[in-house]
Image (spheres, helix red, strand yellow):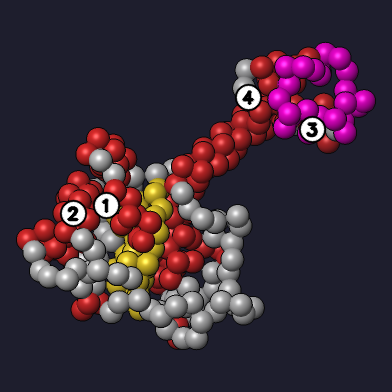
Amino acid sequence: MSSISNDIRDYLQPHIHEMTNKQISLVESASKCRLPGLAMALIDMFSSPNSYTEMTFEDRMEKCLNGQLDAISKSRFARMYRNSGLPRKVYLSSIRPRSEAGVTPDLLRKLTELNYLEAGANIIFMGPNGVGKSTLAIAAAVQAITRGHSVLYYSMNQFSMMLESMNSADYIKLLKKMKSAKLCILDDWGMAHLSDIIILRLAELAEARYGTCSTVFTTQLQRHALGNIAEKQSPALSSLKDRLFRPSDIYVTLSGSSLRGTAGEIRGER
């Protein structure tokens, strides 16, 4: 069984004495072909044959293929989540509506259906500390990954430092990376004023993503102050505001007391 992957070996071990050598060989072949879902479905059927006696050959094949498709989906999600940089997993199903705080059923429906993503619209979650802005943004990102869309997450403070310090070659690579990401999360927008070079590069990134990609912001700024991120006005800043904060974008004001440290806080999975 040296060619069987660790995951399949662990799944097989409790059932190995219930299977013939030929059956184990078939599982090993599926593992060699990198078909873990198929291998696990075969283990299920070989170790509990009485549960499948009434299934036709076609039904058994369908179970095996569905098992492999499910494994592909899980593997893709794990890879895309890992590449996203998200700090944790939060699922929309774990968030309950709190209309009085701004978390309405209509908002949760929009985040679930992802129509805003297809339209290239941005979402801006506004409100004080602890009301769930980042949680909603992360849940939106996880939902997008679940549907197969590429996501990038950045803390705005770290993103700003990265933009300021990177050389031209690395910046060009980032530009290409950002352009290919269907959804970008910028967490804690507007915590500090930004330098001219950061504003210029943000404007270029916004232009590259305009109309085809979406950005979700979390911020403590109010809507009228979203563009107040520099000491002075400039053409680059005007261009940036014009592309990121449009009338057609989705503005969500959250309110209420901080949920941090309370029973209502959603920490998600690391």
Tag 3: amino acid: Asp
Quarter where residue 215 is shown? bottom left
Q: Position of residue 247 (x, y in %)?
A: 18, 70
Q: The magenta stretch spans which residues?
A: 1-24
At 51% across and 82% down in the image, what residue appears? 258
Dot 2: within a 10 Å radius of its alpha carbon, few (fewer than 14), some, or many (20 or more) residues? some
User: Where's the C terminus, which quadrant?
Assistant: bottom right
How far separated are the C-alphas under marks 1 and 2? 7 Å
Q: Earlier in the sequence, mark 3 or mark 4?
A: 3
* Secondary structure predominantly adopted by residues drawn in magenta: helix
Residue 10 badge: 3
Q: Earlier in the sequence, mark 3 or mark 1?
A: 3
Contact, mark 1 vs mark 2 (Cβ under 8 Å): yes
Q: Earlier in the sequence, mark 4 or mark 1?
A: 4
What secondary structure is marked by label 3?
A: helix
* Residue ID for mark 4: 35
Q: Position of residue 97 (x, y in %)?
A: 50, 76
How far separated are the C-alphas under marks 4 and 2? 48 Å
- Magenta span has 86? no
User: Where's the N terminus, which quadrant?
Assistant: top right
